[in-house]
Amino acid sequence: MPRSASRRTFLQGAGTGAAALVLGIHIRLDQRAHAASGQPPAVFDPNVFLRIGADNTVTILSKHFEMGQGITTGLATLVAEELEADWSQMRVAFAPNNPNFYNNLAYGPYMMTGGSSSLANSWEQMRKVGAAARKMLATAAASRWGVRAEEIAVAKGVVSHRGAKRSATFGELAAAATKVPVPRDVELKDPKDWKLIGERLPRLDSVAKTTGSAQYALDVRRPGELIAMVRRPDHFGAQVKSFNAGNAKLVPGVVDVVQVPSGVAVLATDTWSAMEGRDVLTVTWDTSRAELRSTSEILDEYRTLAGGPGLDAARRGDAALALTRASHVLEAEFTFPYLAHAPMEPLNCVMELRPGGAEIWSGCQAHSVDTHVAAKVLGLEPEQVKINTLLGGGSFGRRGNLYGDWIAELAEIAKAISGRAPVHVVWTREDDIKGGSYRPLVLHRVKVGLDAAGQLSGWQHKVVCQSLFVGTPLEEEMAKDGFDRSSVGGLADTPYDIPDLSVESYNARSPVPVLWWRSVGHSHTAHVVETMVDELARRAGKDAVAFRRTLLAKQPRDLAVLNLAAQKAGWGTPLPKGRGRGIACHRSFNTRVAMAAEVTVARSSCTVDRIVCAVDCGVAVNPDIIEAQIEGAVGFALSSVLRNEVTLDKGVVEQGNFDDYDPTRFSEMPKVEVHIVKSLAAPSGIGEPGVPPLAPAIGNAIAAATGKRLYSLPFDTSLLG
């Protein structure tokens, strides 16, 4: 029965007598109403976010998806700190798909994880949840013992009163606490009193992942489920003209073959049979609207676009006039390839259709998108779609797209067989690398000047890139009048003091699907800006760090990470011949990161020996996770710096798996040192900001070692020979 969002139903732990401090969710979810009225208010009700069991465990309901970044441990830390729980009590479960309560406060009325926003948007909310729960438990204890609530102490999961010599565990008080009104206002701890925030607490998911008991969508097996594998076109934008399923149906284990908008699906009782059946399908494709160009042809079009006027992305002063006054002008072109996300766990998800609804098991990153996509395909209301969120084996943006391609495909297949069996759609890695979504192909053209004193004198910048938002539901917000801010992040809003700056943006068109990739536009803008700044410093005859210090004089936090990285890297100390040291700094997702790289160059080969990183991400809730994210970002991005690219030959992707889209190997991983700036500022993102500075730091180190500048990614080290 529908109930208002303000009413609470407290559920007893089934079969154990455990009292659960949790809200029974029975409200009508209507995103359209939210869209009209604005963002849902932040919810601080412990009954929405916590379950306290009779065994004294405290389970938080995480509104954010865990894909390896450690957010569930971070959220639990915030709650445990204010709740005064013992860390051994803490557990995590995923919240249901209900944006009325679990919306991302950074994005408005949407339940989704992304943009390195999870801890930042939950920082105050989850601490208030913990503080409110602590107050409710104390009030329940005071009532039971006949004392004043102000006299109650809470520490390490125990509620006590010294005078009455009474104590109780959270579990013993949970049932009574559910009857206490949720406090409207709570006082949060002074940072000097923090016991858990700032500590290297062990991750809550480490044991399960290490032992193999952690469950991913790929582990799900529903009774009678069928595995579905889809034959998709080799050319983006192609559509099925006709197909012959005869050979596929002869494969033992194959149950059905159906056409869906994305291609032709083969359903079988096991994965191998589905793959074999798919391999012998005969499909004729209509390529009249497909991408048939090779990468070089697309880049030629980009260059033509850059020759004309673009959309104003940033304009300060008069860059053109300043360049006419420059004593030295430098021009450069940078190109960046399509890049695949290539997470370790390939895309997959399960759906069961039932009378009046659907249930999904998925590593779900964008609940609001996936709910609405599935509902639209199935002709249901969004609240009729239930999502069971499971751990994700990586994403880097792939699982959280705005069009819900893999969820739509799942729903189409389940609908095509009239829901007669649960359907488990599985993509192979080849499926996703050859036919998924990509970091856009990008071209930058830059013209910068130096005056006689070696100071910046004009900066003109053009960026040609497919838009991530034009043609999506977020176009009005993120690409108003065609200008996509995600293409120029970190460039149009650079913290560098550049008085005369112009940035123009160009939206290229192609059927190739593009998507945010770890750090989004910063993955290319940082490289261009930091490479040009480094080259300007060299041509001005100035030290690269000193040159940046001048440009960041008005940005104390950015300047601090630059100085810290330089200091820890031993900036200015000599290196042996053939080795070089370079530096880069960049701000993304409100986090400042500076990296110094040391490389060894021998003829046409380059080895990255050492990365020294300084990071200011506000309060370091868990320094160990911050270090892990920076180390992971280095490992993730290094392969894209040295070799990774997705290329098209007459529209067909040439790469397919880790043999020709090779991730960073342990043997080539450099030594990584991470230094965290102490701060009491609210936490900012950490999952993505470690990616942008890596490429320019390495490129600048190569230039220092060889005197030769590499511009485009991945680096063509044959040019160094």
Image (cartoon, rainbow, N blue to C red):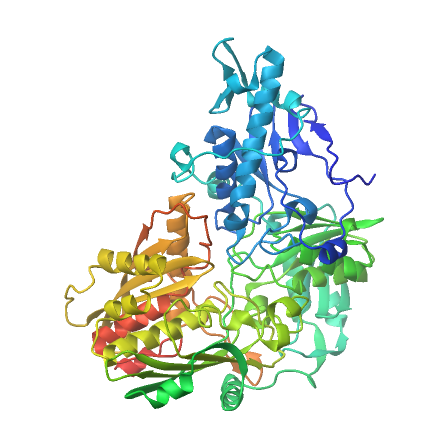
- Name above or below for residue 372 compared with residue 238: above
Vertical order, 338 against 680 (above or below): below
Q: Residue at x 65, y 33 (%)?
A: 47
| Residue 424 visible, this orientation | no
Q: Residue at x 64, y 29 (%)?
A: 21
> To which quarter of the image does residue 478 belong?
bottom right
Relative to residue 164, is residue 587 drawn left or right? left
Q: Nearer the viewer, residue 507 or 698?
A: 507
Q: Is residue 262 above or below residue 685?
A: below
- On-image quarter of the N terminus: top right
Residue 478 in view: yes
Query: Which residue, as the protein is rendered here, is positioned at the far front?
Result: 317
Q: Quadrant of the image for the C terminus?
A: bottom left
Farthest residue toward the top?
164
Q: Residue at x 80, y 39 (%)?
A: 3
Is residue 307 or residue 244 the one in the foreground? 307
Name the spot of residue 44 as percent of width and height, x first. Answer: 61, 39
The spot of residue 544 in percent (x, y) is: 25, 70
- The answer to which image quadrant residue 587 occupies is bottom left
303 with respect to 96 (left or right)? left
- Image position, residue 358 (x, y; %): 77, 51
Please state which of residues 446 and 623 is positioned toward the viewer in this rendering.
Answer: 446
Q: How many marks do you count on the picture?
A: 0
Residue 281 location, quadrant: bottom right
- Identity of the residue drawn at 67% across and 70% down: 231
Depth check, front residue: 703 or 261: 703
* Residue 168: image location, x then y, percent: 54, 16
Q: 507 above or below 548?
A: below
